[in-house]
Amino acid sequence: MKLGDMKPDSFGKIKGISGDEHFMRRITSVGLTAGTPFQLVRNDKKMPVLIYCRETLLAVNREDAGRIEIENE
């Protein structure tokens, strides 16, 4: 399942991330790595996906959310 497919207020863990080198550096620099648990806060269509991860609220754009594979908890 992709990050953008989750429902709000659900919990998950990052299973894998795919993308070019620039994307991987950017996404890992904010703490999103494989195995990281998170809570999906908001997932409105045409808006960034808001997740709470490592005591930080992050906004992930829709394109990037499609590159992040997750597993529900």
Image: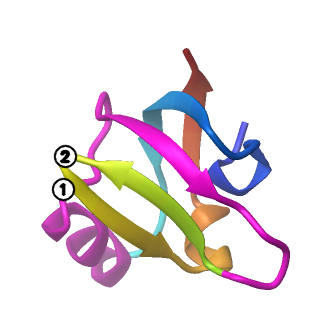
* Amino acid of disc 1: Gly
Report x, y in % for residue 71.
58, 24
Give the quadrant of residue 4. bottom right
Report the magenta residues as a range.
Answer: 21-47
Q: Are marks 2 and 1 in contact (CB under 8 Å)?
A: yes
Left-right relation of 71 to 14: right
Left-right relation of 5 to 42: right
Q: Secondary structure at mark 1?
A: loop
Q: Closer to the camera, 50 or 21?
A: 50
Give the quadrant of residue 61. bottom right
Q: Which residue is mark 2?
A: 54
Q: Is residue 36 magenta?
A: yes
The quarter of the image holding the C terminus is top right
Q: Which mark is residue 63?
A: none
Q: Which residue is mark 1?
A: 31
Q: Closer to the camera, 68 or 21?
A: 68
* Residue at the image point whose x is 19% and y is 67% from the top: 30
* Residue at the image point whose x is 52% and y is 65% from the top: 50
Q: CA distance from mark 2 to mark 1?
A: 7 Å
Residue 4 vs 53, above or below: the answer is below
Label whose residue precedes the other's in the sequence (2 or 1): 1
Residue 45 vs 38, above or below: the answer is below
The quarter of the image holding the N terminus is top right
Give the quadrant of residue 20. bottom left
